[in-house]
Amino acid sequence: MKPPVRIVLVVAAVGLAGFVAWRLWGPDAAHPRRLSGYVEGETLYVGASAAGPVSTVSVQRGQRVAAGQPLFALDAAQLVAARDQAASQAAAAQSQALDAAKGQRPDELAVYDAQRAAAAAALAEAQADYNRVAPLAAKGIYAPARLDQARAALKTAQANVRTVEQQRRVGTLGARPDAVRAAESQAAAARDQLAVAQSRLDQISPRAPAAARVQDVFYQPGEWVAANQPVVALLVDDRVRLRFYVPQAEVALYRPGTRIAFACDGCGAGLGARINFVSPRAEFTPPVIYSRDARDRLVFLVEALPDHPADLPPGLPVDVVPLKAAGQ
């Protein structure tokens, strides 16, 4: 073999060996492949359904808020007055409904009791008079007309007793059923008006729907805000998710509910998330994550809910550990 040919073969062998060594022990071997992605957050804009001046702002930008924590409030003078008026009307209607279902007062029933006692005394007197006149009339001492008078007086006294007893019984009853139902309907309508007034008052002093971070505050106390205009922007923990892209050949491994591991700069170890969405459509690798390690032509978008979203700011790049098929 000629020396130049031998030199070429030696150089080629050394180059091949170097390439293999670089692939095995070079930078790519020290850094295993990762799926590139980023943190995404959907902003929740909180406003009031009514227009008015901002009275108080209870939060600041960047602050953590708990579920139910007050955010801001508009001037509530008019709505408070409307709520108080509705509360008074509801209380009055409820009292009228209760009064309609009741009978007369004890003092009024006591009047019937006195009348019944007087009627009973008159009945006893009429009965005694009849008992005295009847035998004498039978002997002819009294004329039949006298007996008729005693009998009529006795029947009148008996009727008076029954009348007073019936009046007292009616006095213990409430109003007629139709009137009671009408009063109850008016009370229910008044309670609904109170609920509407309270709802309007609550809507001008919103509270945080869930644990979140205050992303921005657009108005300060004293400024006028239009109806439905956002005053505070929240980044709710439940709306923070990871978005990363999986090559077409591996997308079958990623299903909703599957656990994944990921890492990010400045984050602690052992971060995990649960996949909640896999796009059914393939797309070209987005420019935002295109690199030498993520240059697959067709990829699928995958979203996952992190276990601890409170510490993940939107836009933070993440590296997701690829899933492996069974047997790998």
Image: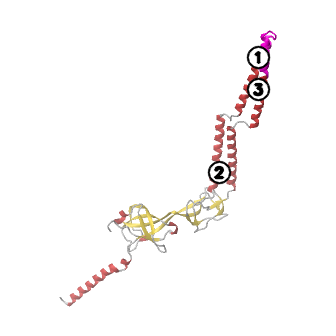
For the residue marked with disc 1, what is the amino acid? Arg
Which quadrant would the C terminus be assigned to in this image? bottom left
**Mark 1 Cα shell of 10 Å, populated few (<14), some (14-19), many (≥20):** some
Circles 3 and 2: CB atoms closer than 8 Å: no
Q: Which residues are magenta?
A: 125-147
Which of marks 1 and 2 precedes in the sequence?
A: 1
Of the numbered discs 3 and 1, the one sitting upstream in the chain is 3
Q: Position of residue 240 (x, y in %)?
A: 49, 64
Residue beneath disc 2: 197
Q: Position of residue 31 (x, y in %)?
A: 39, 76
- What residue would you read off at disc 3? 120
Q: Looking at the rendered structure, which numbered label has been put on residue 151?
A: 1
Neighbour tally class for label 2: few under 14, some 14-19, many 20 plus, Cα within 10 Å: many
Identify the image quadrant of residue 103: top right
- The total number of labels drawn is 3
Q: What's under tag 3, amino acid-wise?
A: Ala
| Closer to the eye: label 2 or 1 | 1
The numbered mark, 3 or 2, whose residue comes first in the sequence reads: 3
Q: Secondary structure at mark 1?
A: helix
Name the residue: 52% across, 67% down: 310
Which quarter of the picture shows residue 183? top right
